Image: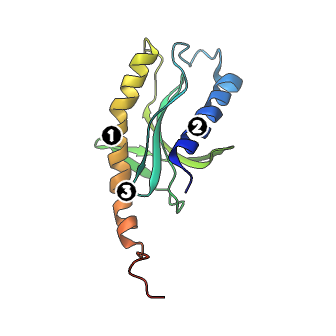
Amino acid sequence: MRDIQELSAAVLASFTRVHREVFLGDPAANPRLPVDVIEPLVVEDVPTMVLLTPWTLNGLFFPPDGVAPDQLTVAGRARPVFAAELEPVGRYLSVNLVPDVRGLPSPERGRTLAQACAAPFQEAVRQLRKPAVAAAPSAAGQVG
């Protein structure tokens, strides 16, 4: 598994590039918002982070076994899970936490909203992974 800080830096660099190449000047993007990675954390065995961009706010997660559910229930609401790949990040899964960030007045408000979304998103990943982590054989319990 990649180090969470290394992965976070790769996500920030990659989505900053996407912003410059695709969304800069797009009327659907909020010019007041930066690309930022909020609350990178390994939950159970899964690196997670909330990605704030001028066009949306997403929860990103990177299951080491590649298991991609159809949906993830965050704060009681089922959200579709999307799989994508972006270099140098690699394959990742995402859920849209806030689809329209155009009305956010400042980077601070965007970060505050992203931080508020982080714990419910992380808990959703925790609930998703509990059965997978519990079912994985423990190295300590193996006879070799």
Mark 2 Cα within 10 Å, few/some/many (few <14, many 20+)?
some
Mark 1 or mark 3: whose residue is earlier in sequence: 1
In terms of image quadrants, where is residue 18? top right
Mark 3 Cα within 10 Å, few/some/many (few <14, many 20+)?
some
Name the residue located 34 percent from the left edge and 61 percent from the top edge: 130
Do labels 1 and 3 touch, CB within 8 Å? no
Mark 2 or mark 1: whose residue is earlier in sequence: 2
Number of marks in picture: 3
Q: Secondary structure at mark 1?
A: helix
Disc on res. 128:
3
Residue 37, placed above or below residue 143: above
Q: Nearer the viewer, mark 2 or mark 1?
A: 2
Mark 2 or mark 3: whose residue is earlier in sequence: 2
Name the residue nearer the viewer: 56 or 135: 135
Q: Quadrant of the N terminus?
A: bottom right
Check disc 1 and report the residue beneath it: 119
CA–CA distance between discs 2 and 3?
25 Å
Q: Could you say where residue 100 lies in the image, as x and y percent from the top left?
A: 46, 24
Do labels 2 and 3 touch, CB within 8 Å? no
In terms of image quadrants, where is residue 44? bottom left
